[in-house]
Amino acid sequence: MPAIEVESLYKVFGKGAKGAVAQLKAGVPRDELNARNVTAAVIDHDWAIEAGEIFVVMGLSGSGKSTLIRMLNGLIRPTAGTIRIDGVELGSLSKREIRRLRREKISMVFQHFALLPHRSVVENVAFGLEIKGLNKTERLERAREAVQLVGLAGHEDKLPAQLSGGMRQRVGLARALAADTEILLMDEAFSALDPLIRQEMQDQLLELQATLGKTIVFITHDLNEAMRIGDRIAICDGRVKQLGTAEEILMHPADEYVAEFTADVDRTRVLTAEAVMEPCGSRDTSAFPTVECDVPVNELYEPVLSSKAPLLVVDDNADPLGVVTPRSIIKSLAPERESGDAEQEPQPA
Amino acid sequence: MIEYLRNWFWTYVWKPLPDMPFGDWMETFIRWAREAWSAGFDAVDAGLEFLYTHLADGLLWLPSGVMVLLFAAAAWAAKGWKLGVGIGLGMFVVAWTPYWEETMQTLAMVLVAAAIAIALAIPLGIAAAESRAFSAVARPVLDFMQTLPAFVYLIPVVMLFSVGVVPGIIATIIFAMPPGVRLTELGLRQVDGEVVEAGQAFGASPARILVRIKLPLALPTIMAGLNQVIMLALSMVVIAGLVGGGGLGAVISGSLGRLDIAAGFNAGLAVVLLAILLDRVTQGLSDRTPVARAARLAR
Ligand SMILES: Nc1ncnc2c1ncn2[C@@H]1O[C@H](COP(=O)(O)OP(=O)(O)OP(=O)(O)O)[C@@H](O)[C@H]1O
Ligand SMILES: [Mg+2]
């Protein structure tokens, strides 16, 4: 059973929302509705997230990302369609039951941190536990653990105003982690941070995820960030334009819209040896040095240049998959490729 | 043509119109209410009288010298030693005038009126912040309360309650309450939407969000409302004195009749010093709210 599942999900703001859904289903474009002061924020979303996955929703400003994530924990009601959390349909729950679901299953990290300015770091982190009804000693103890987990030990008794942006967002993350829910919603959680701290936070999130194994819905308008942390990425503009792994989106953009985004992405960090290899052909590969198939391209330059022979790409069982040469790398990285070359690209599974 | 229209308007609209009846309606209503709800008014009358007399007696229980020191200590605790010294000196000047007793009576009246006004204003402000409809209805009513000349409602209030300190307190509550409601509403509406959303996202109930998030964050603004309420209440002392409220108001209105410049000035000075005391102490308290303290740290 998927952790989160949405089915033909729509959210339309403005008068006559229901009618607008019918029109959207009939193929009326989103812009035409805008002219009538009706905003279609989320159109026909249809996907499922497995437990333990990091699912990234990426899109420009106004593409309905926040609307989507707020529907997932019931802060906004969908205009049409269904959302199931662990198989339970959100629409069938009363307000009370939704509040319980939020306390027990879903927590959220906010773009501007949304901390209580008059409460210390631990008291902020303990907020979710306070609502759950834990007694003071227990919730403070668990809050302290969460504060340590995000690397803020020693700052427990400071006020948010005394912290830097990156530290404040760690408090926001700790608050969500302390609530100990299976699902974590993160709405542009790192967008307000400067690039270095942002990268640090991304690394920390991945590190935490490796041990905690939460189900994470992560929203961003930055495709580099999406590709760095996402197991799968949905590129949205009202509708889902493309849904797939970072590599699938880079190698096979579904349309012009997606292709435009991918032009800015640092491919060498996302693409792996498997994506830039070419078939072994009739070569005798026994003497070639080997690389694992999931090594990113930017770690291949050194071995490729220092080896006279091509590199042999092998999978987990050491079976050969293909070979990497300087030529194959350059060919895969070139942003505009002739249609003739496309035939040689490995097809995604 | 214009002539014709004017004649038409005169004969068909203006002349048949009866005399403006709103004033009569009000009078009938007040007379009726006095009969119908006399028990209620008597109870309110007795209650306010009780609060006022006991508070005034309490303030006059200790000799003025000790009270001056107590006021100075309160100011010190609320803000710091500088204010403590300033207030001590101010209160000493008040004790020096022949009107210490009247000043304490006025203080008691202001405190009772302001406490009741703020106790009514906060729930009304919460309702106005939560409901746009309530806010839309409350706004003109508050405008009315604040701008209607006090003498206008003093007449019915004196009819409903006996002459004395109570009509003064009631008129003061009516006049001083609006900023309490307004600033409570404003403070609650200004609370960062994302923080409220955080409360919702963690599954807090609306009541809990109000008590744990919105009210603490709005507290500095609500305290500013309390400050305004107290200042407006003080500005009503003379009018309260006119209807038998006693205190400094009676001294001032009396000196007005006798053209007694000295007495009027002394009593006026006491009012000003009392205002400064109450203003600084409430401001000091609002600087001590947790949110205001956190905001200072951010700078
Ligand atoms: N409560 C609302 N009432 C009317 N329109 C709304 C409402 N909330 C959002 N919208 C509209 O829906 C669209 C999508 O908004 P949303 O906040 O989901 O975008 P977003 O992808 O999160 O953008 P950003 O990157 O700027 O946060 C926008 O055009 C917005 O104006
Ligand atoms: Mg958004």
Image: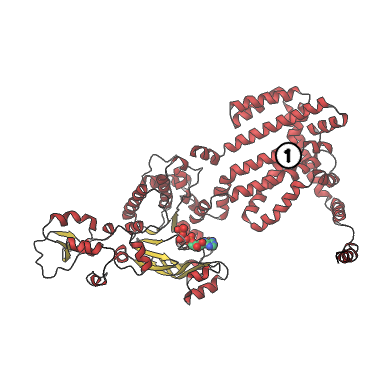
> Residue A327: where, in percent of width, then height?
18, 63
Residue at image coords 33%, 62%: A262
Q: Is residue A311 visible?
A: yes
Where A65 sits versus A199, above or below? Answer: below
Q: Quadrant of the N terminus of chain B?
A: bottom right
Q: Nearer the viewer, residue A270 or A258?
A: A258
Rendered image coloring scheme = secondary structure
Q: Amino acid at mark 1?
A: Ala
**Badge 1 density bin: few <14, some 14–19, many ≥20, Cα 10 Å:** many
Where A138 sits versus A274, above or below? Answer: above
Q: Nearer the viewer, residue B206 or B85?
A: B85
Residue at image coords 51%, 42%: A118
The answer to which quarter of the image holds residue A290 is bottom left
Secondary structure category for the residue under label 1: helix
Tell me the residue that label 1 is attached to: B233
> Residue A176: where, in percent of width, then height?
43, 52
> Residue B194: where, in percent of width, then height?
51, 53
Q: Nearer the viewer, residue A177 or A240?
A: A240
The answer to which quarter of the image holds residue B229 is top right
Single out the residue that lies furthest toward the bottom. A26
Q: Is residue A74 visible?
A: no
Q: Is residue B157 left or right of residue A143?
A: right
Does the Cβ of the disc 1 residue fall within 8 Å of ligand 1? no
Q: Chain of mark 1?
A: B
Q: Is residue A268 left or right of residue A196?
A: left
